[in-house]
Amino acid sequence: MTQAAARAERLTSVASVVARDLKPLVRQIDAEGFYPKEVLRRLGETGAFAHHTGGDAAAGGLRAAVEAMAEVGATCLSTAFCMWCQDALVWYLDRSENPLPRQRLLDAVASGRQLGGTGLSNPMKAFAAIEPIALKGRPVPGGYRVTGRLPFVSNLDDGHFFASIFALEGAEDHRVMSLFHAGQDGVKLARNAHFIALEGTGTFTILIRDAFVPDDDVLSEDAARFVPRIRKGFVLLQAGMGLGIANGSAGLMRSDGAGRKQSALLPLGPDQIEARAAVLAERISDQARNIEEPDRGSFLDVLRTRLDISWLALEAAQSAMLQFGARGYIIGSEAARRLREAQFVAIVTPSVKHILTELAVSDR
């Protein structure tokens, strides 16, 4: 079987999981904050989290990961966001400068047997000088002791892994990227906020108090060197969320026959939404070909693509809401859910304001 045929078969399997297991849960996920852990495991069984491992990212693997996420995101952004968290953890493990975490965990995470998240929101902002690094660590025999607080990390439960970056005490410019084990001594999950959408994403505040990080869990002793190697994948993988919202909004508009006729003069209809999504998907494929290159210029191009995906998600969901009108402005309506979800695409790191800040710096 060719790689293309294998990816198509995996995407068909993802669609089956969406139809059979996810669609019946969407309202519960959105309204009750239900975390679809078993759906994620079934998606892992299809290979949805394994496309971009083993050097396959540039050869179509990253686009295949985005397509799988978009297939899910067309129905439920909460689940697609959890997929991105899982995909990002796979991305870090597959490229770890220390082989031990990769050997121990990559297969389990890529197959969905072990779930986990990405705690790089604060570090990515810190590298962009938007906010200070939140975690501080000190060397001890066999590893580090780390303390700090991460406001929001997703796709978590006790026993899940996540990655983050800490600065060494007394040497703020020296930053280390490592794994953390949710629920281990000194790593506590706390829920202290409720969101207008994506409540069912296993999102917690992480309180880290003198937690021991063994050398075996270190992904890179030099995060400033490592992050440029992973940041393009970190951002491009998110494309599946925005494209999923866009295509899901287009499908919702088409399913509403009478409303579609009455809304023919709206400036953005389903045909235009899908055409823009297709162009962006091609840009993702092009940019994935040099995904390992750490230069800032190509990273800025990736940020521009991510920005355009955010705008499309917002405009598509807005168009769906405008078509549905008062019918969409009712609690529990799908049009309202898609609009709330699209807003998340625009604020998750790197947010629209983060990207615009990075691009403005480059233009000076």
Image: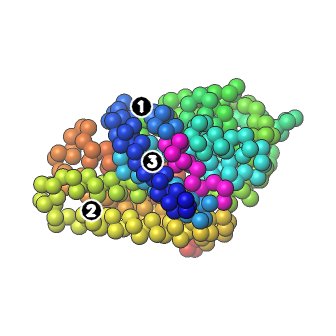
Q: Could you tell which of marks 3 and 1 lies nearer the N-terminus?
A: 3
Residue range corresponding to the magenta coloring: 43-55
The residue under the point 45% across, 65% down is 281
Whether residue 66 appears in magenta in the rendering, the answer is no
Q: Residue furthest right?
A: 141
Which label number is shown at residue 34?
A: 1
The Cα atoms of the two marked residues, 1 and 2, are separated by: 30 Å
Residue 186 appears anywhere in the view: yes
Residue 326: image x %, image y %? 16, 47
Residue 315: image x %, image y %? 32, 60
Q: Which type of secondary structure does the marked residue at label 2 adopt?
A: helix
| Amino acid on which the number 3 mark rests in the picture | Ser
The residue under the point 50% across, 60% down is 5
Question: Quick check: marks 2 and 3 in contact, CB under 8 Å?
Answer: no
Q: Residue furthest front?
A: 1
Which label number is shown at residue 270?
A: 2
Q: Which type of secondary structure does the marked residue at label 3 adopt?
A: helix
Seen from the viewer's position, the closer of residues 186 and 286 is 286
| Amino acid on which the number 1 mark rests in the picture | Phe
Q: Is residue 127 above or below residue 333?
A: below
Bin the neighbour count of mark 1 within 10 Å (Cα to Cα): few under 14, some 14-19, many 20 and up: some
Residue bearing the label numbered 3: 13
Q: Could you tell which of marks 1 and 2 lies nearer the N-terminus?
A: 1
Bin the neighbour count of mark 3 within 10 Å (Cα to Cα): few under 14, some 14-19, many 20 and up: some
Residue 317 occupies which quadrant of the picture? bottom left
Q: Nearer the viewer, mark 3 or mark 1?
A: 3
The residue under the point 62% across, 69% down is 290
Q: Could you tell which of marks 2 and 3 lies nearer the N-terminus?
A: 3
Q: Is residue 284 left or right of residue 218?
A: left
